[in-house]
């Protein structure tokens, strides 16, 4: 091949890269990206005598921050550089390529490896010399400083807006839509939110509640079935109280609340902690249902105790006489907790359906509920077994403490004494739960 004449310059393939942080104004016929490209093309044209040739491909990133390298046009440019199709990268200003010193160092490393020159139209320097690199680093330091200041200003504005209760964008939570940059209640979704909180407050286990929601065809905001993680995000989202939260601090929001404070409190009395710890702590553990209620044949109270063998937990109720004297005067001084609890619960379920208990509950409840029919009381008490199977252990313990005054055990069995006022309270809980579910 014949060498080129001395007067003929080798072709230098130039790629113009443009970037704009926001999408605002990009819909205009002549926008910021076009203005940047026009200046770069003019510069390339001025270097025509040096053999500079503008490549036809456009590398435009509209709506992408300079603080990251994850930009589609930039990735495409780097791929072309690695493929040996680019000799010079031309930008309007260096911060269009990157605002991060670390990211720019990575880009310069790619440029050096592929012998690609970097040119800024408004900031003249040569990256192949030590002085050019120093100038570049100084300019980049100011670019990064400017980006950090802008970030701080945006964060301060965001925090101030949240303190005023303003909605600052993002996905609208289930139960709301965004209208005029504000949260507005979505009536149908709000009913679902109230139903979720109400059923959870009644002690329905999360997995059963999720299965019910799936059977009902309830979907999340993205049109997918509600899963356990999503359920707990809903239950812990204070936006439903009409609040705006920023970095763990709640402020009164501009939007309307969906959940009342007392319902929220009942739900979080059950959760008591983060979703990651509730199973092994509050909700998942098995409380002593008969704590303070159980008495041995000698009349001494029986206290909960446990032991662990081969990694398995065994629960007992032990007579305080046995604990104090270190000896047992009866075979009933120490009994398995699960067995006696099952016996007591089974007897309670049977007793609540007896005519005597129905009448006693009706007489106690009608003092606060005018016109209450005995038939209504009977129907609600008959629902007790259905409700019991859906309760958390903590809620089961609360119900037992309400219903039972004392349990005396003997070799003949267990003698249970119920609380009349507790019967009325349980009836009201059943009735209130049904009304909320119907609503």
Image (cartoon, rainbow, N blue to C red):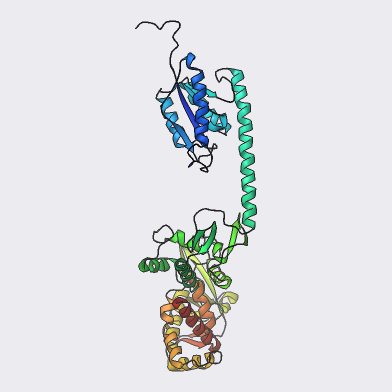
Q: Residue 336 location in percent, x, y? A: 46, 75
Examine the rendered structure and indicate whether residue 169 appears above or below residue 105: below
Q: Nearer the viewer, residue 326 or 19?
A: 19
Q: Nearer the viewer, residue 369 or 332?
A: 369
Residue 101 visible in the shown view: yes
Examine the rendered structure and indicate whether residue 99 appears above or below residue 376: above
Q: Residue 41 location in percent, x, y? A: 49, 25
Image-quadrant location for residue 322: bottom right
Q: Residue 339 location in percent, x, y? A: 44, 77
Q: Nearer the viewer, residue 174 or 386?
A: 174
In the drawing, does residue 126 fall left or right of residue 86?
A: right
**Residue at 58% across / 31% down in the picture?**
101
**Residue at 51% across / 76% down in the picture?**
397
In the drawing, does residue 53 fall left or right of residue 163?
A: left
Q: Nearer the viewer, residue 28 or 7?
A: 28
**Residue at 44% across / 29% down in the picture?**
77
Q: Residue 380 location in percent, x, y? A: 44, 85
Q: Quadrant of the N terminus?
A: top left
């Amino acid at each position: 091949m014949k060498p080129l004449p001395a007067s003929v310059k080798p072709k230098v393939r130039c790629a113009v890269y443009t970037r704009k942080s926001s999408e605002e104004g990009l819909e205009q016929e002549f926008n910021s990206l076009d203005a940047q490209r026009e200046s770069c093309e003019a510069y390339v044209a001025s270097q025509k005598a040096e053999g500079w040739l503008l490549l036809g491909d456009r590398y435009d990133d509209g709506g992408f921050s300079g603080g990251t390298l994850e930009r589609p046009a930039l990735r495409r440019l780097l791929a072309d550089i690695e493929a040996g199709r680019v000799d010079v990268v031309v930008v309007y200003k260096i911060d269009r390529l990157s605002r991060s010193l670390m990211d720019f160092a990575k880009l310069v490393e790619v440029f050096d490896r592929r012998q690609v020159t970097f040119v800024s139209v408004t900031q003249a320097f040569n990256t192949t010399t030590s002085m050019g690199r120093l100038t570049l680093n100084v300019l980049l330091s100011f670019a990064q400083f400017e980006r950090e200041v802008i970030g701080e200003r945006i964060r301060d504005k965001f925090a101030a807006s949240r303190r005023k209760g303003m909605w600052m964008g993002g996905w609208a939570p289930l139960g709301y839509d965004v209208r005029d940059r504000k949260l507005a209640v979505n009536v149908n979704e709000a009913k679902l939110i109230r139903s979720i909180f109400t059923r959870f407050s009644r002690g329905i286990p999360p997995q059963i509640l999720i299965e019910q929601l799936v059977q009902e065809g309830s979907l999340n905001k993205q049109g997918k079935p509600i899963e356990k993680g999503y359920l707990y995000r809903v239950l812990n989202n204070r936006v439903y109280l009409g609040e705006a939260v920023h970095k763990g601090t709640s402020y009164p929001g501009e939007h309307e609340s969906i959940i009342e404070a007392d319902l929220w409190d009942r739900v979080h009395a059950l959760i008591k902690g983060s979703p990651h710890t509730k199973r092994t702590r509050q909700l998942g553990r098995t409380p002593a249902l008969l704590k303070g209620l159980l008495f041995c044949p000698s009349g001494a109270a029986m206290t909960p105790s446990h032991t662990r063998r081969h990694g398995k937990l065994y629960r007992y109720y032990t007579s305080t006489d046995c604990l104090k004297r270190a000896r047992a005067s009866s075979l009933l001084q120490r009994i398995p907790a699960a067995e006696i609890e099952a016996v007591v619960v089974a007897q309670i379920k049977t007793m609540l359906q007896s005519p005597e208990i129905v009448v006693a509950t009706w007489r106690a409840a009608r003092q606060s509920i005018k016109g209450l029919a005995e038939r209504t009381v009977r129907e609600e008490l008959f629902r007790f077994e259905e409700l019991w199977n859906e309760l958390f252990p903590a809620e089961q313990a609360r119900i037992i403490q309400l219903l039972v005054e004392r349990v005396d055990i003997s070799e003949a069995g267990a003698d249970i004494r119920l609380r009349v006022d507790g019967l009325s309270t349980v009836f009201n809980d059943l009735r209130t739960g049904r009304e909320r579910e119907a609503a």
